[in-house]
Each structure stands twice: as structure tokens, then as C-alpha cells.
Image (spheres, rainbow, N blue to C red):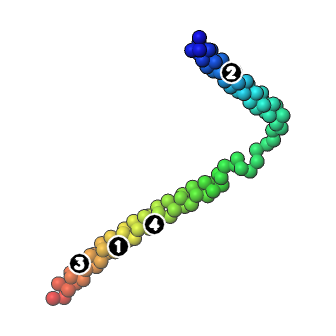
Amino acid sequence: RVDQLKYDVQHLQTALRNFQHRRYVREQQERQREELLARTFTTNDSDTTIPIDDTLQFNESLQNAHRGMDELIGSGTNILQGLRDQRVTLKGTHKKILDVANMLG
């Protein structure tokens, strides 16, 4: 009989805890619902802005650097082409000088 009473007490305590927990959850949900209904919504503040200006400026800087490197490469190519042309001209001049020297003896 004592064991039966212990079992009944444990069963009733568990049922009471479950009831209290369900009641607490329901009250919390009602409180949150009331808070949401009472809240007044406003427009976004400055905390939600995206720093797109900084990103655009960074992108523009990268494009300028890329353009500058292209100009440097183009300038280097032009310099090399100029040196090749000078070499051809100097070779022609050297050949003419040798021809003149051979004619004079």
C-alpha cells in the first residue's frame, strides 16, 4: 500500500510539473504576442545601412590600379619596339659606313 502511495505521489508530481510547464510556456507566448502587437514599427535606422560607398571606392581603386598596370605594360612594349627600330637603323648605318670605308680603301 505504501509503494502504491509513493507511485501515486510521483505520478501526481510529474503531472503537476507538466501542467506548470505548459502554463508557463502559454503565458510566455501570450506575453510575446502582446509585445509584438503593442510595438510600433519605424523605418530602418542607420545601423542597417550597407557600406556600399566604401566597396565602390575600393572597386574603383582596383580598376585604376589595373588600368595603370596596363598603361605601364603598353609603355614598356612601345619602348622595346623603339629600341628594335633603333637597332635596325643603326645596323643599316653601320653597313653603309662599312660600304663607304670599303670604297675608300
Q: Is label 2 in a helix, a strand or a loop?
A: helix
Mark 3 or 4: in front is: 4
State the residue position of label 2. Answer: 16
Mark 4–mark 2 CB contact (< 8 Å): no
Q: Residue at x 83, y 38 (%)?
A: 40
Q: Residue at x 21, y 82 (%)?
A: 98
State the residue position of label 3. Answer: 95
Mark 4 and mark 2 lie on one chain; the one further toward the N terminus is 2
State the residue position of label 4. Answer: 72
The quadrant holding residue 64 is: bottom right
Q: Residue at x 76, y 32 (%)?
A: 32
Mark 4 or 2: in front is: 2
Mark 1 and mark 3 lie on one chain; the one further toward the N terminus is 1
Mark 3–mark 4 CB contact (< 8 Å): no
Mark 3 and mark 2 lie on one chain; the one further toward the N terminus is 2
Residue 84, horizontal then vertical, whole percent: 33, 70
Mark 4 and mark 1 lie on one chain; the one further toward the N terminus is 4
Count residues near mark 1 (Cα–Cα under 10 Å), then give few for <14, some for 14-19, many for 20+.
few
State the residue position of label 1. Answer: 83
Count residues near mark 2 (Cα–Cα under 10 Å), then give few for <14, some for 14-19, many for 20+.
few
Left or right of 100 on screen, residue 57: right
Mark 1 or 3: in front is: 1
